[in-house]
Image (cartoon, helix red, strand yellow):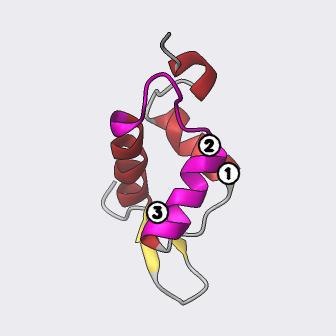
Amino acid sequence: YFLPSGVRQKNGKKTASNVIKYLIQEMIDMENKRKPLSDQAIKERLLDEYDIDIARRTVMKYREQLHIPASTKRRKR
């Protein structure tokens, strides 16, 4: 808890996992509920908007830790 894990980027900067989880939560809170973001789309937005390069499976792991279901289960009609 006192020493949060993080992700080291190619440029040498380290981003705390708590920050990445917060960004994922924010993206999902703001998404179009009729067309929710996939883990791949979240991964691409993290890279494009925040220069955070993580694997899709890491997005999935963090999403599951936040108790957020997959995009297919978040879809509203």
* Count of numbered badges drawn on the protein: 3
The amino acid type of the residue labelled 3 equals: Ser
- Secondary structure under tag 2 reads helix
Residue furthest top as drawn: 77
Whether residue 17 is visible? yes
Residue indicated by mark 1: 56
Label 1 environment density (alpha carbons within 10 Å; few <14, some 14–19, many ≥20): some
Asked if residue 49 lies left or right of residue 73, the reply is left
Span highlighted in magenta in the image:
29-49
Q: Residue at x 42, y 57 (%)?
A: 20
Residue indicated by mark 2: 39
The amino acid type of the residue labelled 1 equals: Arg
The amino acid type of the residue labelled 2 equals: Asp
Q: Is residue 11 magenta?
A: no
Residue 42's spot in the image, x, y percent?
Answer: 55, 49
* Circle 2 or circle 3, nearest the eye: 2
- Secondary structure under tag 3 reads loop
Residue 6's spot in the image, x, y percent?
Answer: 48, 66
Residue 54's spot in the image, x, y percent?
Answer: 61, 63
Q: Quadrant of residue 27?
A: top left
Residue indicated by mark 3: 5
72 vs 77: above or below: below
